[in-house]
Amino acid sequence: IYLRRLHARRPHCSVDMIIPLMIIGLARVAALGFCNDHNPSCANWAKNGECRGKNAEYMATLCPLSCSTCTHECKDTETDCGNWAKAGHCTSNPIFMYKACPTSCGLCTPTCKDAHENCDSWTKAGACGENPDFMLKHCPISCGVCKDKCTDTHSDCPGWAADGGCGKNPGFVLKTCPNSCDVCSSNVCADVNTTQCEIWGKDECLNNPSAMMRDCPQTCEVCSQVCFDKEEACRDWAAKGQCEENPASMLALCPQSCGICQELENFGKDEL
């Protein structure tokens, strides 16, 4: 079963867009979002019936995939999700919001891609702060909206991890299911020692996956670049209007709570 590799579709198309003083070609990408559990024990808890009863609401947030709060490939289904989330409805009305607005409520993390080769130079010139409406959508990685994170890319990851797959078949399962296998020691997916990982190189990821994918997840291409809040207080700050009052820092620090992740999710579907 571990040898079956299902790759998510990443639709993209090209479009020419005119902005002041230049014409740029953009590869517009509709972001695919992934619903991941937040604890390696979620699959076992779900089997034991914890998704129902007195712990149901807590489990829906902690174990959204195992408890079927959201499907593995997920997205907001209502256009007002971003506004509802900023107004605090993920907390006040979780049963509806988790189902309808998994991205805006932080259960679903859309994948990201810079849409233009000049994103890096524009970012260095200060464009992320000067023109956030354009830059945060077209250059989310360069502007820091999206960062590397350990994200499961297959719906069966919680079950595989619970059955010991992380140790039995590390070459495939650790790379496909880094979240369920607890590959990352922190919220960010990064090599423990960048110099040493560079010396070992990608070949060692194949020869010694159990150690390399935990110590060198970036080198081994375990990480996914996704849109997510970087601080636990983001939802509270957004409810207090900080997304509008302090956009320069909030939109990159708290893109999920400020509605940027939802915009990235839909980016590429509508005319710019």
Image (cartoon, rainbow, N blue to C red):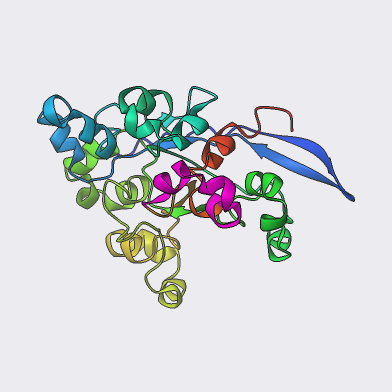
Residue 127 % position (x, y): 72, 57
x 72%, y 56%: residue: 130
Which picture quadrant has residue 219? bottom left
Asked whether the viewer can see residue 7, the reply is: no
Magenta stretch prevailing secondary structure: helix
Q: Is residue 6 left or right of residue 63?
A: right
Give the camera-side residue of 169 and 66: 66
Residue 76 % position (x, y): 47, 27
User: Where's the C terminus, which quadrant?
Assistant: top right
Residue 85 among those drawn in magenta: no
Q: Is residue 12 above or below residue 148?
A: above
Residue 106 % position (x, y): 40, 39
Residue 147 % position (x, y): 49, 54
x 38%, y 61%: residue: 205
Which picture quadrant has residue 203? bottom left
Q: Is residue 181 left or right of residue 116?
A: left
Give the camera-side residue of 77 and 224: 77
x 36%, y 51%: residue: 232
User: Where's the N terminus, which quadrant?
Assistant: top left
Q: Is residue 67 above or below residue 16?
A: above
x 40%, y 46%: residue: 236
The residue segment tinted magenta is 232-251
Residue 250 among those drawn in magenta: yes
Q: Is residue 196 above or below residue 242?
A: below
